[in-house]
Amino acid sequence: MSDKVAKLELDGKTYDLPVLKPTLGPDVLDIRKLYGEADVFTFDPGFTSTAACESAITYIDGDVGELLYRGYPIEQLAEKSTHLEVCYLLLYGELPTAAQLADFTQRVTKHTMVHEQMHYFFRGFRRDAHPMATMVGVVGAMAAFYHDSTDINDPWQREVAAIRMIAKLPTIAAMAYKYSVGQPFVYPKNALSYAGNFLHMCFAVPAEEYVVSPILEKAMDRIMMLHADHEQNASTSTVRLAGSSGANPFACIAAGIACLWGPAHGGANQACLEMLKEIGTVDRIPEYIAKAKDKSSGFRLMGFGHRVYKNFDPRAKVMKESADEVLGLLGIENNPLLQVAKELERIALEDDYFVSKKLYPNVDFYSGIILEAMGFPTSMFTPIFAISRTVGWISQWKEMIADKNQKIGRPRQLYIGPQKRDYVDLRHR
C-alpha cells in the first residue's frame, strides 16, 4: 500500500480511499469499506475497471503490448522454453532447475491416462456432440472418478488435482475428438512430449503408424504456451468465482471450460477462420474492409483488436512465425486463407482507420490457420484452447485458495426494477 489516499465527497461527507500500489500497472483504489461507510456501491459492468483479486501470476500492459508470465516476457518464453516448463513456472512461481523440470515432466507424463470407466462415460453423448460440450461434462465428472483429490483444504490433494488436470485434459480432448469422428480412442504414449502426445492421440489410428512432425509438435507447444494464462479474463474469473464457494477443483475447471466456449472468448479463432473463408480471395478484401468501416453493415473484422491490448498482441508475432513454418512444412505456403490473412493484415496495419482505432492483429488471427493446416476441424479449436489454459486456471485457483483475503464472490447490482408493491389477487387483475 502506498501513502496516497483518494478522497470521495458525497452528500457533504468525505471518505478516504486507500491507494494500493502494485509492482506493475496502475494504482488501485481500495473500496472495500466504501459500502459499509457510505452506503453506496460502485458500478462497473464487465468489471473492466475493477481489480477483483491480488495476483502474482500474469501481468498485461495493453498500452505497450506486453505479456509477462511471472515476470518473464512471452516472447522469450516462446523462443526458449517449452509448455511444460511454462506450466511449472505458472504453478510454482519460478523457472525450474533441470532436476525439477525432469521430475515435473515425469509426474505429468505418468498421469496422462484416464480411468478406464471414463471410456464408457463418453458413450452417453451423441456422436455429433460438440467436443466442448463433451469436455464440460467429462471434466466435471472427474470429481466422481478421483475422490482422493477433491479436498481443497489439503495442500497435497490440491497438488494432485493440479497435476491430474494438466496431464489428463489433452487425453480427454483427444477422446472427445476421436468420439466425434467415429474413431477408436488412442492411449497416451509416455515416450512423447506433451504436445506430441496430444497430436498422436488425435491423429493416430490402430491400423498404421503415426509419426509426429517436429515442426507441428513445436507449433502445438507454442500454441499451448501462448494461451497458458491471460490474467483475469472471463474464464479465469469464472474459475475463481466458482472456487470462492469452496467447489472442488474439477468443477471449477469445468466451469472455466464452459465460459471459454463463448465465441467472444475461446471461440474467437474459429470465428476468425470462418471470416477468412467468407472473404475467400484477396481481391474481395477491399469490399470487406469497406464493410468493417461502415457501422451500419453489422460486419466486424475478427482477429483484430483486443479487450486489453491497445497496441499490439505480443502473442500474434510468435503465432505468425509458427504459421509460416507449419504451412511451409505442409507445402501450402500459397494457401488461399493465408494469402487473405497476410493481405488483410498488411492493409489493416497501413489503413488510417484501423491504425487510429488500434485494431492490430491478435493471437486468434493466425492460430486458426495453423490448427486447420494441422488437420483439426474448427470444432476442436476451443478444446485446444482449453487444454492450453488449464494450467493458468489451476494456478489462479491455487493462488485464490491460499489468499487469506479471499471471500466468496458476490457482485452487487444497480437495481432498476419495480419498487415494493402489494400482491393483487388473480380475480382483480
Image (cartoon, rainbow, N blue to C red):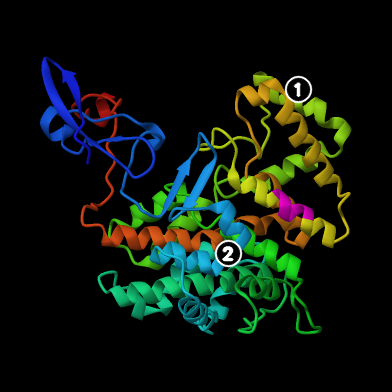
Which quadrant is the N terminus positioned in?
top left
Q: Is residue 322 magenta?
A: yes
Residue assigned mark 2: 81
Q: Is residue 252 left or right of residue 188?
A: left
Q: Quadrant of residue 185?
A: bottom right
Q: Dot 2: few (<14), some (14–19), or many (≥20) neighbours within 10 Å?
A: some
Say whether residue 239 is left or right of residue 330: left
Q: Callout 1, which amino acid?
A: Ala
The mark found on residue 290 in the picture is 1
What is the chief secondary structure element of the magenta stretch? helix
Q: In the rendered view, does 143 fall on the left or right side of 314?
A: left
Element assignment for label 2:
loop
Could you tell me residue 386's position as x and y percent?
55, 59
Residues at marks 1 and 2, CA–CA distance in whole angstroms: 41 Å
Q: Is residue 194 magenta?
A: no
x and y percentages locating residue 429 in the rendered image: 29, 24
Asked whether residue 129 is in view, the answer is: no
